Image (spheres, rainbow, N blue to C red):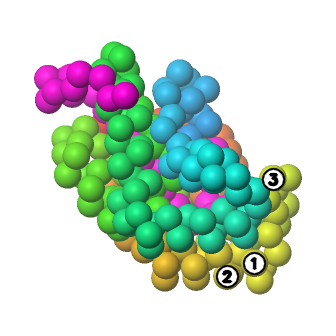
Amino acid sequence: MLKYYSMKNLRDVKIIAVVGMSGSGKSVAVDYLTEHGVPKVYFGGMIYKEMTKRGIEITPDSEREFREMIRATEGKDWVVRQAIAETKDLIAAGQKRIVLDGVYSWTEYKILKHEFPGELTFIAIITPKALRYERVARRPERPFDAQKIRERDYSEIENLEKGGPIVAADYFLMNDGTIPELYKQLKRVLQEINF
């Protein structure tokens, strides 16, 4: 249930949306923020919650298929509507700093920018493709080989418009080095936007 919400609740609120392709390091940046006490609204969590509710087993393939199906049947804005409600609940509860994890589409980007016009900053994590593929192949959770990650890239760009939010981001962090180097870039942005 959405709590009382008005524009005055937005005073001093800052929201960051972290975007990037799979293996770019989005989770590393988001984890840094959550470890520093920033609550996260996880877009993928909306998908997992709905899949569980419908009794659908969660696998990389079923998650991708469901994500595309729910947007096709319920509207491209289905996930973002759930995320906006959760974000507004956090604001109504007094949260002033929030991170959005998993904004996928251009539709979601436009709706979020309209919903939170002065409060929302998009940060894109950029990583060379070969390095992303290497990272995804090595990760312990949901590793993919080069062919699978290439298929996922194409699917996300063509079917989910994932490129738009990345290209239109307010800040770009190049993540081709160490985690501390990524943190240093992120901290610089946080300082600049007074997050």
Residue positioned 70% across, 66% down in the render: 62
SS category of the residue bearing label 3: loop
> Identity of the amino acid at label 2?
Glu
Residue 162: x percent and y percent?
46, 70
According to the picture, the residue beneath numbered tag 1 turns out to be 148
Residue 154: x percent and y percent?
58, 82
Asked if the stretch drawn in magenta spans residue 14, the answer is: yes
SS category of the residue bearing label 1: helix
Contact flag, marks 2 and 3 (Cβ < 8 Å): no
Left or right of residue 161, residue 26 in this image? right
Please tell me the numbered disc located at residue 40. Answer: none
According to the picture, the residue beneath numbered tag 2 turns out to be 151
Please tell me the numbered disc located at residue 141. Answer: 3
Q: Which residues are magenta?
A: 1-29
Q: Between 155 and 24, which is closer to the camera in this rendering?
A: 155
Q: Is residue 195 visible?
A: no
Ranked by sequence position, the earlier of labels 1 and 3 is 3
Quarter of the figure that contains the N terminus: top left
Residue occupying the far top of the picture: 94
Q: Does 150 sit above or below residue 60? A: below
Q: How far apart in space, not on screen, are marks 2 and 1 (Cα)?
A: 5 Å
Contact flag, marks 1 and 3 (Cβ < 8 Å): no
> Identity of the amino acid at label 3?
Glu
